[in-house]
């Protein structure tokens, strides 16, 4: 089975303009993401961007980049255009966020393993919340949660706490159920990627502002791989400072 990795990267981020070109430990954020992915997928790694500055920066460090339309509403749409331009006969496309410079090889390997199951149409990752964490981490609506069925397929994603634990004080919830945080890495069979980008927004997606609910609501099956690795995403300049400190501890 042939896999390719595509990293969507925009320059015009509302909270952190130019984020892919921000410098982290002497390298740009996008270079660090690219190198992590290429350590598994080699020259089947691409950056999909709408900005010539990002395109040129990727080419300058020896990476492979694809120019895409500036009008895409999501990274998934940008990736679909890039895949059409790249061509070839890949079976599965892995979508790695351009603001995850610490994405680990083990995480990419885990999402690849999801396709050992022939029924997998889309795959993603989840990480069990640490029981020692403050419960506020689980309650945080910026950390979507997910629940899976007995075969490891996603049943639902939510910004709310799922499931609700009836009959127990919240202080006991972490000991009552293994709450799982959703990590924003996806992989799609190529034909499925082409199909889902043609779907209109769904009511659940609009309600929760979670794109993956569009796919579930339209009947697509999402396999969930589990990881124990916590990544450090970068959404703001403050996150970049925290990432610098994290890098020093590695």
Image (tube, rainbow, N blue to C red):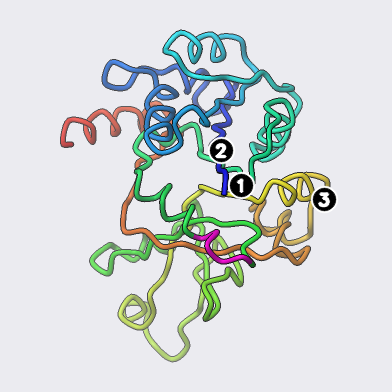
- Cα distance, mark 1 to mark 2? 7 Å
Say whether disc 1 or disc 2 marks the residue closer to the N-terminus.
Answer: 2
Q: What secondary structure characterizes most of the magenta part?
A: helix
Residue 76 place in picture, x, y as percent: 67, 40
Instruction: Using a 10 Å C-alpha cutoff, classify the residue at mark 2 as few (fewer than 14 neighbours), some (14 to 19) or many (20 or more).
Output: many
Q: Are marks 1 and 2 in contact (CB under 8 Å)?
A: yes
Say whether disc 1 or disc 3 marks the residue closer to the N-terminus.
Answer: 1
Q: Is residue 36 above or below residue 91?
A: above
Say whether disc 3 or disc 2 marks the residue closer to the N-terminus.
Answer: 2
Instruction: Using a 10 Å C-alpha cutoff, classify the residue at mark 3 as few (fewer than 14 neighbours), some (14 to 19) or many (20 or more).
Output: few
- In depth, the one of 11 and 168 nearer the eye is 11
Question: Is disc 3 placed on a helix, strand or loop?
Answer: loop
**Residue positioned 53% across, 37% down in the render:** 5
**Residue positioned 55% across, 59% down in the render:** 115
What residue is disc 2 on? 4
What residue is disc 1 on? 92
Residue 78 place in picture, x, y as percent: 68, 32
Region rendered in magenta = 114-118
Question: Is disc 2 placed on a helix, strand or loop?
Answer: strand
- Cα distance, mark 3 to mark 2? 23 Å
Q: Is residue 13 left or right of residue 62?
A: right
Residue 45 counted in the magenta span? no
What residue is disc 3 on? 199
Residue 115 counted in the magenta span? yes
**Residue positioned 62% across, 22% down in the render:** 49
Q: Is residue 61 left or right of residue 191?
A: left
- Cα distance, mark 1 to mark 3? 19 Å
Q: Is residue 86 left or right of residue 201?
A: left
Q: Residue furthest left?
A: 249
């Amino acid at each position: 089975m042939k896999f390719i990795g595509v990293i969507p990267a925009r320059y015009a981020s509302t909270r952190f303009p130019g984020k892919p070109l921000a410098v982290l430990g002497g390298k740009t954020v996008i270079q660090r993401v690219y190198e992590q992915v290429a350590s598994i997928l080699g020259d089947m790694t691409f950056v999909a961007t709408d900005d010539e500055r990002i395109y040129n920066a990727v080419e300058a460090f020896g990476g492979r980049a694809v120019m895409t339309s500036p009008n895409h509403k999501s990274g998934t749409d940008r990736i679909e255009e890039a895949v059409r331009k790249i061509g070839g006969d890949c079976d599965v496309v892995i979508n790695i966020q351009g603001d995850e410079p610490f994405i680990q090889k083990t995480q990419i390997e885990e999402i690849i393993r999801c396709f050992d199951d022939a029924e997998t149409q889309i795959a993603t990752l989840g990480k069990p919340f640490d029981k020692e964490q403050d419960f506020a981490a689980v309650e945080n609506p910026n950390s979507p949660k997910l629940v899976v069925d007995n075969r490891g397929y996603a049943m639902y994603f939510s910004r709310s706490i799922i499931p609700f634990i009836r009959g127990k004080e919240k202080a006991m919830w972490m000991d009552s159920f293994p709450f799982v945080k959703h990590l924003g890495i996806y992989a799609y069979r190529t034909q499925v990627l082409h199909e889902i980008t043609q779907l209109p927004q769904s009511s659940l997606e609009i309600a929760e502002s979670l794109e993956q609910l569009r796919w579930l609501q339209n009947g697509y099956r999402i396999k969930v791989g589990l990881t124990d690795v916590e990544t450090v995403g970068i959404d703001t300049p403050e996150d970049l400072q925290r990432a610098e400190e994290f890098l020093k501890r590695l």
